[in-house]
Amino acid sequence: MRSRPSVVVAAVAAVAILGGLTACGGATATPLRTEPSRPSAIANQTIPATPTRTATPAPTATPLAIGDACLVGRWTLTSLVMTDTASLPGVVLTFKGQVGTLLTLGADGTEVYDLTNSTQLVGSGGGHTVSWQGQGVQRFYFHGEGGQWFESGPGQAATATHVVVDGAARPDFTNVAPPISGTYACSASDLKMTAVDPVAVTQLFKKQAP
């Protein structure tokens, strides 16, 4: 059996041979010890950037669908004058009445023309008289701006009841009113609206309290 010193010598020789093979065979040799580089205070110094000031945009008002904000509200009809050349051929009739009609105009461009609590519409001219009671609620889209207004949307029906022509009762009838256009003048409490087609009409309204 081999002595201990022989085993130690053989072990040392094996380590030496292994070390030589490692250095010559392309394996990684033990790296030389180098001093770590010291960081440069100037190189690593970060200079904060000057923040750029941006101007806050001024808020802009969203335009109303109806156009003129003065038109928005609930308006009660106080006067209506209409000139009609269609009801009786060759005769010019001047109508007045329909007081109490409620016109509601919304900021979203909606119009509601409510005849529920209106008075009779009475016309006369050329020796003839015509009267009826209007019933119905008409709804359109409405836009007014710069003194001009117009409606849009499908025609709306209204019914004439208690119809009397030259003193004789006539059957009720329903008429589909098309959207129309015209001019207006508006203040905080008063609204004047005019139209010329299909009939010439001027309407005066008072604004209801909110």
Image: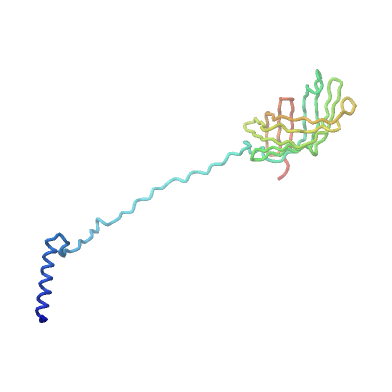
Q: Measuring from the top left, give residue 23's x and y in whole percent.
A: 12, 63
| Residue drawn 69% across the image and 37% down it | 111
Q: Measuring from the top left, give residue 188's x and y in whole percent.
A: 68, 39
Is 5 located above or below residue 104 in the figure? below
The answer to whether 147 appears left or right of 137 in the picture is: left
Looking at the image, the residue that sits furthest to the right is: 167
Considering depth in this image, is 1 or 201 the residue closer to the camera? 1
Considering depth in this image, is 31 or 88 the residue closer to the camera? 31
Considering depth in this image, is 188 or 138 the residue closer to the camera? 138
| Residue drawn 11% across the image and 65% down it | 20
Q: Measuring from the top left, give residue 43's x and y in whole percent.
A: 25, 55
The answer to whether 22 appears left or right of 151 in the picture is: left
Is 42 located above or below residue 184 in the figure? below
Tally of numbered tags: 0
- The quadrant in which the C terminus is found is top right
Looking at the image, the residue that sits furthest to the front is: 1
The answer to whether 107 appears left or right of 44 in the picture is: right
- The quadrant in which the N terminus is found is bottom left
Figure quadrant of residue 126: top right
Figure quadrant of residue 172: top right
Q: Measuring from the top left, give residue 149's x and y in whole percent.
A: 66, 31
Q: How is the image coloured?
A: rainbow
Considering depth in this image, is 139 or 128 the residue closer to the camera? 139
Figure quadrant of residue 165: top right
